[in-house]
């Protein structure tokens, strides 16, 4: 037997599946040939390892995970197709509905801002309530008055008068509850002053009924009503 | 001679009797009132820029500037005597008769005489009664009467003066300072301002009922009568100060100092 024949049969020999005559021929060749004897020893050691390792370590890994990894690798290696570019829409290319909605929004917001600004900046000061007449209004103010954004001088005066009357009523009630405890001199002094104030209020009211544009009387009426309020408030403390 | 001496003796006896009766009558009638008056006196040493704030109920208040760093308060209290609790609060002397006597049905007049340093700020107020301030040279002089009483401010050098009353006269005698503010207001009475001819001010004087506004030496072409003579608006000199005078049912007069 030569070396080639020995190497071809040596695997079957190791499995003990050769006939006795061939097996003895191989044994005789292995005894004479060191090279084939080395191959036989290597094969024997491999077989020995295979038979001694636990079965669990030889088991193939989870097939699903393995496929997943394989898939990932394949996908990563495959280049993605170039994205299809959407045709760009320019910002002015809005639909009619979008355009009209935008215009409407701008109009509403600017109107609101204008109203707020006008109300804040053209509201007359407290001193001006009764000092202004329609004759002294600017054209812009007249327009705003007509629209209803600001009060006319007459409206402002009426509103101011109502506020003052409310305050006067409040203090008057307090004075009436206190005045029974005053001495006679205090009561007389109070009544005399109140009489003069009421006379003035009546005078200015009459003048303003005849001439609502009389600024000076409007201003004086405001001043006298303030005096009345102060007198009541001062005497309500007594 | 005998007759004369008898006569003299007789007359003197009747005179003595009359005098005795008068004295008895005087004490019977006036003694309770005399004994009912009480006195109050307090002094507060002050520093610079002290401020006096007084709120009286009824009675007169006289404030006089003096050359001492001290506020001296003296008062006579008519029966039933008011409670007075002056307070010294960080550069401010506060007397509030209204607050201290709130809830009391009757409180007698309290007549104050207060001496303050020349440079003290004076802020006095009363419900009824006269107010007088003199010889004060400070940044504020304010006098207010809620109802009746006269206000007299004499020898005042201040750049913020305010006088306000209901029924009564207002008299101001002092200097008009540059950029100062001077406000006088009355319901009925006469308002007279005596100021130097060298003053410079912007004026708004209103006497809507009487239309009696007398500018005297201060009348010039820069002064305009408005509203059928109910108001005068104008400027005297360079007009750096502001004078506002309102008299609802009385007159306004300017006098040269």
Image (spheres, grey):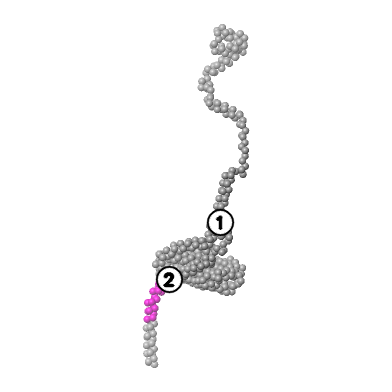
**Label at residue A102:** none
* Above or below for A76 versus A175: above
Q: Where does label 1 land, which residue?
A: A118
Q: Residue B33 colored magenta?
A: yes
Secondary structure category for the residue under label 1: helix
Q: Is residue A126 visible?
A: no
* Above or below for A164 versus A51: below
Viewed as shown, does residue A66 lie left or right of A181? right
Q: Position of residue A161 (x, y in %)?
A: 49, 63
Q: Give the farthest residue toward the front.
A: A96
Q: Residue B60 colored magenta?
A: no
Viewed as shown, does residue B74 lie left or right of A36? left
Query: Residue placed at 48% from the left, 61% from the top?
Result: A163
Check the picture and name the quadrant holding the N terminus of chain B. Answer: bottom left
Query: Residue placed at 39% from the left, 78% from the top?
Result: B26
Which chain is home to disc 1? Answer: A
Locate residue A149: give its quadrant: bottom right
Secondary structure category for the residue under label 2: helix
Circle nearer the viewer, 1 or 2 = 1
Closer-to-camera residue (B237/B24): B237
Q: Where does label 2 land, which residue?
A: A188
Query: Residue placed at 54% from the left, 18% from the top?
Result: A50
Viewed as shown, does residue B11 lie left or right of A40? left
Q: Which residues are magenta?
A: B21-37
Q: Position of residue A52 (x, y in %)?
A: 52, 18
Badge 1: how crowded within 10 Å, few (<14), some, or many (20+)? some
Name the chief secondary structure element in magenta: helix
What is the CA distance from the residue labelled 1 to the residue labelled 2?
Answer: 49 Å
Closer-to-camera residue (B41/B75): B75
Point out the tag, 1 or 2, that comes first from the N-terminus: 1
């Amino acid at each position: 037997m030569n070396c080639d024949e020995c190497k071809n049969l040596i695997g079957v020999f190791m499995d003990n599946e050769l006939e006795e005559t061939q097996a003895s021929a191989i044994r005789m060749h292995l005894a004479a040939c060191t090279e084939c004897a080395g191959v036989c020893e290597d094969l024997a050691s491999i077989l020995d390892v295979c038979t001694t390792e636990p079965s669990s370590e030889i088991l193939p890994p989870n097939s699903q995970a393995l496929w997943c990894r394989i898939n990932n690798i394949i996908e990563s290696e495959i280049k993605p197709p170039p994205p299809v570019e959407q045709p760009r829409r320019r910002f002015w290319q809005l639909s009619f509905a979008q355009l009209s909605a935008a215009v409407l929004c701008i109009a509403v917001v600017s109107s609101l801002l204008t109203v707020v600004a006008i109300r804040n900046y053209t509201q007359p000061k407290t001193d001006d309530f009764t000092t202004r007449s329609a004759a002294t209004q600017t054209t812009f103010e007249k327009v705003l008055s007509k629209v209803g954004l600001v009060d006319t001088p007459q409206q402002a005066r009426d509103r101011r008068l109502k506020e003052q009357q409310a305050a006067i009523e409040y203090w008057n009630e307090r004075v009436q509850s206190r005045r029974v405890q005053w001495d006679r001199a205090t009561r007389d002094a109070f009544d005399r002053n109140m009489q003069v104030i009421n006379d003035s209020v009546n005078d200015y009211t009459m003048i303003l009924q005849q001439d609502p544009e009389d600024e000076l009387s409007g201003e004086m009426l405001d001043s006298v009503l303030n005096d009345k309020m102060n007198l009541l408030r001062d005497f309500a403390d007594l | 001679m005998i007759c004369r001496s008898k006569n003299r003796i007789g007359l003197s006896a009747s005179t003595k009797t009359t005098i005795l009766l008068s004295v008895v009558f005087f004490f019977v009638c006036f003694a309770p009132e005399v004994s009912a008056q009480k006195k109050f006196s307090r002094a507060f040493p002050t520093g610079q820029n002290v401020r006096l704030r007084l709120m009286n109920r009824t009675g007169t208040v006289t404030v006089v500037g003096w050359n001492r760093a001290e506020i001296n308060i003296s008062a006579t209290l008519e029966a039933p005597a008011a409670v007075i609790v002056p307070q010294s609060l960080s550069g401010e002397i506060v007397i509030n008769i209204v607050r201290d006597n709130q809830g009391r049905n009757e409180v007698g007049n309290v007549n104050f005489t207060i001496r303050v340093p020349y440079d003290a700020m004076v802020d006095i107020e009363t419900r009824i009664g006269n107010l007088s301030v003199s010889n004060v040279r400070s940044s504020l002089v304010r006098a207010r009467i809620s109802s009746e009483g006269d206000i007299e401010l004499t020898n005042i050098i201040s750049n913020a003066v305010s006088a306000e009353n209901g029924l009564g006269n207002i008299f101001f005698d002092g200097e008009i300072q540059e950029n100062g503010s001077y406000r006088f207001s009355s319901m009925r009475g006469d308002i007279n301002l005596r100021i130097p001819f060298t003053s410079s001010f912007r004026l708004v004087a209103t006497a809507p009922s009487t239309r009696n506004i007398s500018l005297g030496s201060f009348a010039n072409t820069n002064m305009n009568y408005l509203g059928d003579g109910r108001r005068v608006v104008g400027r005297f000199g360079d007009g750096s100060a502001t004078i506002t005078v309102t008299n609802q049912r009385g007159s306004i007069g300017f006098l040269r100092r």
